[in-house]
Image: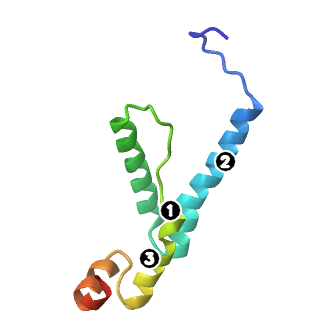
Amino acid sequence: MPENSTEYSFSMKESIIGAQMLFVAFGALVLVPLLTGLNANVALFTAGAGTLVFQAVTKRMVPIFLASSFAFIAPIIYGVNTCPGHHVRTSGRRCAVYHPQLVR
């Protein structure tokens, strides 16, 4: 295919990469907020903003999608359960104020 052609050729490799991206995005943008109690809209906005900033900094040299990580589920759930009755958005700050022995 010529370099300046506008035709698109569907390939199996691209469909597999697209399916992988679908699972990554679903897990990061839907499952993590559901498991942690965070707002899915905030997860979507921060994933988009973080990806755009990363792409601007790297001048689009690295194809990547930045989003929530399953690595942070345990600490978030611990923080929410340690300071019950507080909103998820502020539980970390309030926990640090009310329970300074937990923050070292």
User: Where in the figure is residue 95, as x and y percent of width and height?
Assistant: 30, 85
The residue type indicated by label 2 comes to Gln
Tell me if label 3 and label 2 are in contact, CB under 8 Å: no
The residue type indicated by label 3 comes to Ile
User: Where in the figure is residue 54, as x and y percent of width and height?
Assistant: 38, 43
User: Where in the figure is residue 15, as x and y percent of width and height?
Assistant: 72, 37
Helix or strand or loop: what does disc 1 sit on? loop
Q: Which labelled disc corresponds to residue 69?
A: 1
- Label 3: how many Cα within 10 Å (few below 14, some 14–19, many 20+): some
The residue type indicated by label 1 comes to Ser
User: Where in the figure is residue 26, as x and y percent of width and height?
Assistant: 60, 57
Task: Identify the residue under disc 3.
Answer: 76
Question: 55 left or right of 33?
Answer: left
Picture quadrant where residue 61 is located: top left
Decide which of tag 3 and tag 2 comes sooner along the chain: 2
- Label 1: how many Cα within 10 Å (few below 14, some 14–19, many 20+): few
Residue at 60 percent of width and 14 percent of height: 6
Which quadrant: the C terminus?
bottom left
**CA distance separating discs 1 and 2:** 16 Å
Residue at 35 percent of width and 36 percent of height: 56
In this orientation, which residue lies closer to the viewer: 30 or 69? 69
- Label 2: how many Cα within 10 Å (few below 14, some 14–19, many 20+): few
Task: Identify the residue under disc 2.
Answer: 20
Figure check: 2 above or below 30: above
Helix or strand or loop: what does disc 3 sit on? helix
Tell me if label 1 and label 2 are in contact, CB under 8 Å: no
Task: Find the residue positioned furthest to the left.
Answer: 97
**CA distance separating discs 1 and 3:** 11 Å
Decide which of tag 1 and tag 2 comes sooner along the chain: 2
In this orientation, which residue lies closer to the viewer: 64 or 88? 64
Residue at 59 percent of width and 60 percent of height: 27
